[in-house]
Image (cartoon, helix red, strand yellow):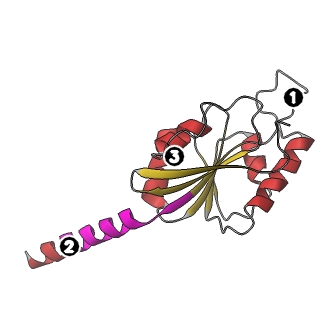
Amino acid sequence: MKKVLIFLAFTFLFFQIGRAQTTEIWVVRHAEKERSDPQEKNPDLSEEGKVRAGDLARYLKKENIDVAFSTPYKRTHQTLDSLVIPKVINYNDIKSLVDTVKTSYLGKKIIIAGHSNTVLEIIEAFGGKRPREELTDDDYDFIFHLSVKGDKARVKMDQYGVPHHL
């Protein structure tokens, strides 16, 4: 019985320590994609997008990102290519992304590359308030920094690289 109580006490302690950790997450939409072939479902980044991917690396150069998450599309992976990241993990749905981060990457620094129709949903799924009403198909220069603790997230919005909307 004594061993069970000690085990439960340690489990509770580790749970409390885990809840107290802050996870830093940056969420970006992929950079500009190649649009020369409208039939292409998985285009590469355009030259402008490659420049923006480099701008992202410069923006985050002082952060030691532990892990990156990307949809399985070339443009999201290529957006992260300029960053020095030890591990890039594909995700297909937001719920599993959030579950994975909260169970395996608590207290880490993470970047997530998504799409115009998923970035704001990702922020909300982590407990953050939507900082913009929407992202349009022309919004490439926004970056969102989330400080996640438990089920709450503080969200800061910034822009990087050449402003897309002049």
Is label 1 in a helix, a strand or a loop?
loop
- Residue 64 at x, y = what percent? 66, 69
**Residue at image mark 2:** 9
Identity of the residue drawn at 36% across and 62% down: 19
- Most foreground residue, 161 or 10: 161
- Above or below 61: residue 164: above
As drawn, which residue projects farthest toward the top? 39
* Mark 3: few/some/many CA within 10 Å (<14, 14-19, 20+): some
- Above or below 23: residue 1: below
**Residue at image mark 3:** 97
**Residue at image mark 1:** 35
Please name the amino acid that badge 3 sits on. Leu
Query: Alpha carbon of mark 1 to alpha carbon of mark 3: how far?
Result: 28 Å
Left/right of residue 4 with respect to residue 38 in the rendered view: left
- Above or below 85: residue 2: below
Please name the amino acid that badge 1 sits on. Arg
Q: Read off the magenta span.
A: 7-24
